[in-house]
Amino acid sequence: MHGLQVVSDPVRRRIIELLAEGEASAGEIGKIIAEEFQLSQPGVSQHLKVLRENGFVSVRVDGTRRLYRITPGPLQEIDSWLNRYRALWEEPLSALEKELRRPRPQSNGHDPDQPTT
């Protein structure tokens, strides 16, 4: 499955957002996802499995808990793919920033933004 297909699902994107804050147990993730998406624990487990099998998360066992964390590789691949399109939104923003920073001509003592009386 391509990385964009993996993150196209809102549940998996939310899991990644949660894990961006740090490592979390399957139970902690399941509780939040169940509340937000009305999804059962087996449903959450399926999403975690997809993320794990596609390299987005890794899991370690700590006693009876499974702790998940983000693995950055697939997100970096998506970022690299997006990089070729980044100019579509960065160039217009750069032009706006230049315009906003451009010195304004001095006026004859009145502020052009203030109404004249």
Image (cartoon, grey):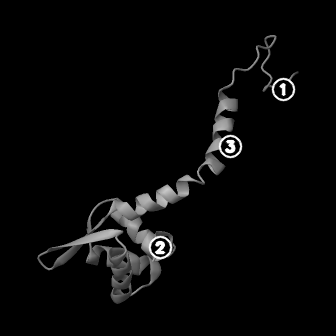
79 in relation to 90, above or below: below
Residue visible at 69% across and 20% down in the picture: 103
Question: Which mark's residue is nearer the viewer, 3 or 2?
Answer: 2
Q: Name which of mark 1 and mark 2 comes first in the sequence.
A: 2
The one of 9 and 4 positioned closer to us in this rendering: 4
Q: Name which of mark 3 and mark 1 comes first in the sequence.
A: 3
Distance between the Cα atoms at labels 3 and 1? 31 Å
Residue positioned most to the right: 117
Q: Amino acid at mark 2?
A: His
Q: Name which of mark 3 and mark 2 comes first in the sequence.
A: 2
At label 3, counting other C-alpha atoms closer than 10 Å, the crowd grade (few under 14, some 14-19, many 20 or more) is: few
Left or right of residue 86, residue 43 in this image: left
Asked whether the beta carbons under mark 3 and mark 1 sit within 8 Å of each other, the answer is no
At label 1, counting other C-alpha atoms closer than 10 Å, the crowd grade (few under 14, some 14-19, many 20 or more) is: few
Residue 109 falls in image quadrant: top right
Q: Which residue corresponds to mark 3?
A: 92
Question: Which mark's residue is nearer the viewer, 3 or 1?
Answer: 3
Residue visible at 32% across and 63% down in the picture: 71
Q: Position of residue 70 (x, y in %)?
A: 32, 64
Q: Which residue corresponds to mark 2?
A: 2
Asked whether the beta carbons under mark 1 and mark 2 sit within 8 Å of each other, the answer is no
Q: Secondary structure at mark 1?
A: loop
Q: Amino acid at mark 3?
A: Pro
Distance between the Cα atoms at labels 3 and 2? 30 Å
At label 2, counting other C-alpha atoms closer than 10 Å, the crowd grade (few under 14, some 14-19, many 20 or more) is: few
Q: Quadrant of the N terminus?
A: bottom left
The one of 7 and 73 positioned closer to us in this rendering: 73
Q: Which residue corresponds to mark 1?
A: 115
Q: Amino acid at mark 1?
A: Pro
